[in-house]
Image (tube, grey):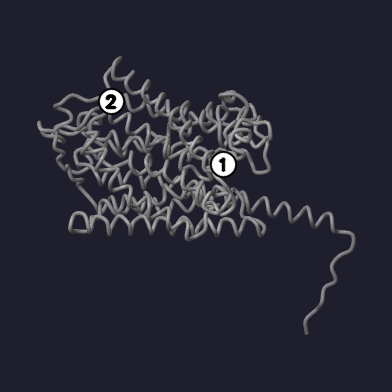
């Protein structure tokens, strides 16, 4: 016989407090789990980049991916977190925090929020590595990785996620006065990926192509990667990590609103990835006579990058459209950058993250179910998205030009010809990845 328990009297306030505590604890655990998944993208990038390049440079590539997270963690903790979230979003840049986290006020633990933001910062720096692979001095890589983590990313992050002017919804603010909408980038198509892509293409321009990449007549020659199995595993890891990257940006899981939101973002993220890969596979099959594995891997990433801005606002069908468009455009972007511009990007980072990051952000302005132009809400939000990604990437381009061409002029960015021909592993690190 069941015993019916009578709820205690006069405990309404205490019960509510307990439930709030449970909710905050659940939100904290969700945020930290998402941070773990985003951190897991770091080996995904490492394996993908290593697989798409030659075996003689593998140790160098793996080392750079470790450096990105080590540098990013320390520099973002000491200074970048304040630059991004200090001064309550006012001004051009926040105030440096010098390792003091007490300035930040929020419901969730500041230490957990710092870790979550740190893994995003490291991702932005890592994107650049692939486009500059196989010919960059390791010492110079340390410098530009530090500058991205400490300066370039936190400042544009201050304008957006830090509560700055691009996301300021005050009625007298610039964005509301100009467009009637603020810039929206839920998880970083523009803030993380397009910035990394723009820096990647400028870095590759400053370096110049790898030896033997272009003939005297200017014809592009393929330099195949040494291990597509490794690259494919890297993409699978990145696909998994993106389920922390996008849904985790909700920063909460308790309550109906949050559980519906993260479920929706999971779905749109996965659909865009699948659609991007399918679009690229069938286009390469039609265009080249055979479905390309290497390009299909990048097509999956193109769909993931494209959906990252609007994964919370678009419908599942909208996510499929974004994935399809990004997967198709990717193929032509890689060809144009390689064959027409003669910029040597070994992993296609400038196309995957730069072109598709911009495209996905702009398409959010069209396909958002709450304020998109294709849903009858006018063109204000689309204008805000275009303006936001333009400003952010112009900032990245100016900084990247000064950074990479400055290093090239003052110290040299590229290794000697003999080192490039024989491999960076032995000359730069004194050990080979394969023995």
Label 2: which residue? 206
How many residues crowd mark 2 within 10 Å: few (<14), some (14–19), many (20+)? many
| Residue depicted at 59% across the width and 48% down the height | 251
* Image mark for residue 158: none
Q: Nearer the viewer, residue 351 or 210?
A: 351
Above or below, comparing residue 249 to residue 170 in the picture: below
Q: Secondary structure at mark 1?
A: helix
Label 1: which residue? 380
Comparing labels 2 and 1, the label whose residue is closer to the camera: 1
**What x and y, as percent, mark residue 212?**
13, 34
Q: Earlier in the sequence, mark 2 or mark 1?
A: 2
**What x and y, as percent, mark residue 394?**
43, 29
How many residues crowd mark 1 within 10 Å: few (<14), some (14–19), many (20+)? many
**What x and y, as percent, mark residue 256?**
66, 60
Q: Which corner quadrant holds the N terminus?
A: bottom right
Question: In the displayed structure, does residue 337 sit left or right of residue 65?
Answer: left
| Residue depicted at 43% across the width and 58% down the height | 320
Query: Where is residue 204, by image quadrant?
Result: top left
Q: Secondary structure at mark 2?
A: helix
Above or below, comparing residue 317 to residue 435 in the picture: below
In the image, farthest residue toward the right? 10
| Residue depicted at 19% across the width and 39% down the height | 56
């Amino acid at each position: 016989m069941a015993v019916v328990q009578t709820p205690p009297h006069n405990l309404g306030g205490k019960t509510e407090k307990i439930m709030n505590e449970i909710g905050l604890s659940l939100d904290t655990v969700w945020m930290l789990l998402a941070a773990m998944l985003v951190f897991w993208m770091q080996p995904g990038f490492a394996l993908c980049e290593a697989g798409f390049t030659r075996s003689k440079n593998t140790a160098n590539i793996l080392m750079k991916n470790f450096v990105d997270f080590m540098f990013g963690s320390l520099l973002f903790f000491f200074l970048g977190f304040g630059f991004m979230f200090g001064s309550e979003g006012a001004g051009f840049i926040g105030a440096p925090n010098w390792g003091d986290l007490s300035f930040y006020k929020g419901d969730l633990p500041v230490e957990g929020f710092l870790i979550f933001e740190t893994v995003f910062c490291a991702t932005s720096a890592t994107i650049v590595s692939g486009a500059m692979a196989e010919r960059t001095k390791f010492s110079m890589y340390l410098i530009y990785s530090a500058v991205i983590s400490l300066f370039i990313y936190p400042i544009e992050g201050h304008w957006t996620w830090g509560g700055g002017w691009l996301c300021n919804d005050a009625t007298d603010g610039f964005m509301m006065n100009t467009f009637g909408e603020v810039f929206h980038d839920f998880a970083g198509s523009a803030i993380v990926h397009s910035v990394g892509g723009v820096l990647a293409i400028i870095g590759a321009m400053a370096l110049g192509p790898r030896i033997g990449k272009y003939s005297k007549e200017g014809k592009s020659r393929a330099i195949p990667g040494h291990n597509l199995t490794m690259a494919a595993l890297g993409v699978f890891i990145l696909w998994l990590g993106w389920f922390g990257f996008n849904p985790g940006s909700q920063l909460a899981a308790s309550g109906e609103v949050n559980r519906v939101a993260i479920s929706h973002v999971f779905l749109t993220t996965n659909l865009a990835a699948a659609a991007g890969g399918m679009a690229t596979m069938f286009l390469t099959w039609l265009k080249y006579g055979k479905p390309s594995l290497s390009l299909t891997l990048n097509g999956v990433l193109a769909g993931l990058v494209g959906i990252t801005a609007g994964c919370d606002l678009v419908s599942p069908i909208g996510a499929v459209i974004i994935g399809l468009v990004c997967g198709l455009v990717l193929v032509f972007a890689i060809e144009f950058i390689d064959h027409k511009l003669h910029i040597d990007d070994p992993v296609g980072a400038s196309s995957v993250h730069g072109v598709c990051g911009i495209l996905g952000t702009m398409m959010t302005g069209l396909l958002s179910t709450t304020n998109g132009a294709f849903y009858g809400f006018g063109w204000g939000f689309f204008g805000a998205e275009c303006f936001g990604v333009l400003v952010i990437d112009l900032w990245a381009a100016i900084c990247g030009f000064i950074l990479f061409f400055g290093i090239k002029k003052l110290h040299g960015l590229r290794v000697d010809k003999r080192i490039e021909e024989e491999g960076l592993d032995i000359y730069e690190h004194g050990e080979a990845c394969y023995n």
